[in-house]
Image (cartoon, rainbow, N blue to C red):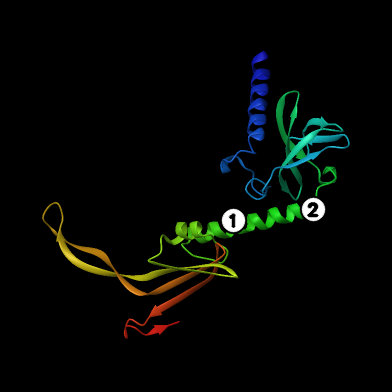
Amino acid sequence: MKRPYFLVLWALLLLLLVVGARADLDPALREQGVLYFEGNLPEKLVATIHTTTTLYLHRDYQMPLAALYDGQKVELIGMAPEGYLLTTTLRNNTTTGWIKPNDLPSGIDPAIFVTAQKNQARRDAVAVAIANKNVIQGMTPEEVKRAVGAPNGVASRSDPHGDALTWIYTTYREDPQYEYGLDGFGHPVLQTYYVKVPIGQMIVQFVNGAVYSVEQHKNDPNNPGVVTN
């Protein structure tokens, strides 16, 4: 009769450990629909509870975890439309859970949440650009390298308005070529390989460390040297 009760306690312990780990960097442990502040704010968002507040296991607020009291120090680590995710120390243990929107400690500038949302939106846009090998405004030189590699040419200048950097990339078209070869049994097989044909340039201009503009120039393959935009 004791074994099922032990298994229930063990499962609950594992669940609490997972919830407590959601402030970690591992994206696999993060909840969908939650804006995490790590990487989106320059500093930790620490606050003090000023009234008795219930901390819940999930953002459906069905399972209370603990009662937070006046003077309790907490760190807000995320937010969602349902409320705020925070971590705190209770009885020498780190506990992570949710509080309702109306229980947000006073003294926090709401603009900090707008900043976090903008920073996350930028990170999402850059991640999509890198995945699609595109360059967009606001990317850093390192992010551009991750998207399209190192440039073929570099130019830079400094003036009273700031530092400007220009990266030049040669763009290519891959044309298929066909030839016959022999397979392992000596039978002729048609093989395909691709030849890179230069078709233009991509010019990326940085101003003060971020992409300011991206220009695409294509050479007319029927009239080399003529630029068509």
Give the residue drawn at x 74%, y 29%.
89
- Where is residue 99? Give x, y as percent: 79, 40
- Would residue 222 appear left or right of 1 to someone viewing this image? left
Give the residue drawn at x 83%, y 42%.
105
Look at label 1 and name its amino acid.
Arg
Vertical comparison of 179 with 40: above or below: below
- Would residue 149 appear left or right of 158 to someone viewing this image? left
- Residue 67, which numbered label? none
- Where is residue 79? Give x, y as percent: 72, 47
Closest to the observer, 222 or 143: 143
Look at label 2 and name its amino acid.
Pro
- Would residue 157 appear left or right of 219 to someone viewing this image? right
Closest to the observer, 195 or 161: 161
- Where is residue 82? Give x, y as percent: 76, 47
Give the residue drawn at x 40%, y 64%.
151
Residue hosting label 1:
123
Label 1: state its secondary structure: helix
- Residue placed furthest toward the front: 160
Vertical comparison of 161 with 19: above or below: below
Residue hosting label 2:
110
Closest to the observer, 11 or 139: 139
Q: Quadrant of residue 212?
A: bottom right
Vertical comparison of 31 with 150: above or below: above
Disc nearer the start of the sequence (2/1): 2
Label 2: state its secondary structure: loop
- Where is residue 125? Give x, y as percent: 58, 60
Q: Quadrant of residue 226?
A: bottom left
